[in-house]
């Protein structure tokens, strides 16, 4: 029996074994051997997920060593990268090829397989999450195959597995849609929440990226708007809120404070009212709340399990210190988000049932059918996913 825990230390497991795979061949062999033994296996990247996607009493396979860029197609603006590649490790090789990621999340420590598994996103009303940029992927499956899936090849697998939750097999590489390399300039300012809410519905459309962290007790929103620029990069790089440099140098940040997080995605137009409702909740239930609420936006997509499936989206996150009991406040916040038809982030804390998820995700059954076809015996499921499937 081994011990495993996630980034915050709040999600733990006692797996029978932890394996580290560093080659596609080993991933295929491990997946096949696990299936033959009638056991279960869950992949892990950098363990940044707050939802118990990884815990299993079977095998945990750490794929972070299967890393690096395989090839870059500069004409198609696409790159094929090994699954365990950290997002930050893509910045320089892509820039050298004149390319960049379409968007990035708040941090860049995650693996590309882990980030695509849960629909990791940044901010911007015209920008989709990272799963929507997956143009192909390779998966080591339960029957010992390496399935390659893309728009042209095994399309039904690609359609579902762009947002895979680690449930189709061990992903060994992914192909990503990119764009020409670009520089961005950030502008940061502070305001109260009332001031922010007054212009929020319009201002999110005025910038490529717009977001803020609102600190309820101080009633101070730390706001950031980021746009493309032709200005030269400015080094040494300034503090967050004042940077001007290549996209991979600016869009993600350093967030080292151990916390847990709940994030919900609501229809874009409902975002300001939902935030006002969360403020009312905090005034009632947590007047001393010292931790920030993050507000971002996300373009609609066609990715089956995406929180932005066919709907322009605003996302709202609550953070709590990892040493605290987050459940009472997160459950109360979840009730507010549910009133706004919110869909929970797949990698963050939520308490929704499979029946809830089925009603929130129109392609829920299609996703499970595609998954179950590839893994009928549930080799790549754990308790959390099985509970959701079985409702
Ligand atoms: C500090 C912090 C900041 C964050 N910022 C953002 C943000 O800005 N935007 C956002 O949307 N989310 C954010 N997240 C959430 C995070 O991006 C997701 O939880 C993401 O899935 C974590 O990636 P990971 O590599 O750590 O994957 P893990 O948490 O290790 O795994 C996530 C899922 O991927 C699967 N998986 C991993 N590798 C493979 C593989 N090779 N094959 C098959 N399945 C695999 C796992 O089984 C699991 O289901 C943040 C989390 C933290 C802790």
Image: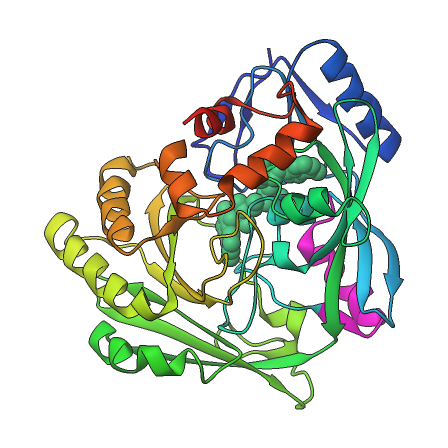
- Give residue 10's position: percent from left, percent from top: 42, 32
In this view, the residue in front, 307 or 209, is 307
Is 6 inside the magenta-drawn segment? no
- Residue at position x 64%, y 25% in the image: 380
Question: Residue drawn at (76%, 37%), measured in percent from left and top?
Answer: 139
Q: How many marks?
A: 0
Tell me the magenta residue range. Answer: 84-100
Quadrant into which the N terminus falls: top right
Q: Is residue 51 visible?
A: yes
- Side of 329 relative to 374 (left or right): left
The stretch drawn in magenta includes residue 99:
yes
Q: Residue at x 79, y 39 (%)?
A: 66
- Displayed quadrant of residue 314: bottom left
- Residue 23 in view here: no
Residue 98 quadrant: bottom right
Query: Percent position (x, y) of residue 275?
Result: 26, 63
Q: Give the residue furthest to the bottom.
A: 231
Q: Residue at x 29, y 39 (%)?
A: 326
Q: Is residue 156 above or below residue 341?
A: above
Pinpoint residue 377: horizontal percent, then vertical percent. 64, 18
Comparing 40 with 367, the one in front is: 367
If the picture is divided into quarters, which one holds ligand 1?
Answer: top right
Point out the image quarter for the C terminus: top left
Residue 364 appears at what percent x and percent y?
50, 41
């Amino acid at each position: 029996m081994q011990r495993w825990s996630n980034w915050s230390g709040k999600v733990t497991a006692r797996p029978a074994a932890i394996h580290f795979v560093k080659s596609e061949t080993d991933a295929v062999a491990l997946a096949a051997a696990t299936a033959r033994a009638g056991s279960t296996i869950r992949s892990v990247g950098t363990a940044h997920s707050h939802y118990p996607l990884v815990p299993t009493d079977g095998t945990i396979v750490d794929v972070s060593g299967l890393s690096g860029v395989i090839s870059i197609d500069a004409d198609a603006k696409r790159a094929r990268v090994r699954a365990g590649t950290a997002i930050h490790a893509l910045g320089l090789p892509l820039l050298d090829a004149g390319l960049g990621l379409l968007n990035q999340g708040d941090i860049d420590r995650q693996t590309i397989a882990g980030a695509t598994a849960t629909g990791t996103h940044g901010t911007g009303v015209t920008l989709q999450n990272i799963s929507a940029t997956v143009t192909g992927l390779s998966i080591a499956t339960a029957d010992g195959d390496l399935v390659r899936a893309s728009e042209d090849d095994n399309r039904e697998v690609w359609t579902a597995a762009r947002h895979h939750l680690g449930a189709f097999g061990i992903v060994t590489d992914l192909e990503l849609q990119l764009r020409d390399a670009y520089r961005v300039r950030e502008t940061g300012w502070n305001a109260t929440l009332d001031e922010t809410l007054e212009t929020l519905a319009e201002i999110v459309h005025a910038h490529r990226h717009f977001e803020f962290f609102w600190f309820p007790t101080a009633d101070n929103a730390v706001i950031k708007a980021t746009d493309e620029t032709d200005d030269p990069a400015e080094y040494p790089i300034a503090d967050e809120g004042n940077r001007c440099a290549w996209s991979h140098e600016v869009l993600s940040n350093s967030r080292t404070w151990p916390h847990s997080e709940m994030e919900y995605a609501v229809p874009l137009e409902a975002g300001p009212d939902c935030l006002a409702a969360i403020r009312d909740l905090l005034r009632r239930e947590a007047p001393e709340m010292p931790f920030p609420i993050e507000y971002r936006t996300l373009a609609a997509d066609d990715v089956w399990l995406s929180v932005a499936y066919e709907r322009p989206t605003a996302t709202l996150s609550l953070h709590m210190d990892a040493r605290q009991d987050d459940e009472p406040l997160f459950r109360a916040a979840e009730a507010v988000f549910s009133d706004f038809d919110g869909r929970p982030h797949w990698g963050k804390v939520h308490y929704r049932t499979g029946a809830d998820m089925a009603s929130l995700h129109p392609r829920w059954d299609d996703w499970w059918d595609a998954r179950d076809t590839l893994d009928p015996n549930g080799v790549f499921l754990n308790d959390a996913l099985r509970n959701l499937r079985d409702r």
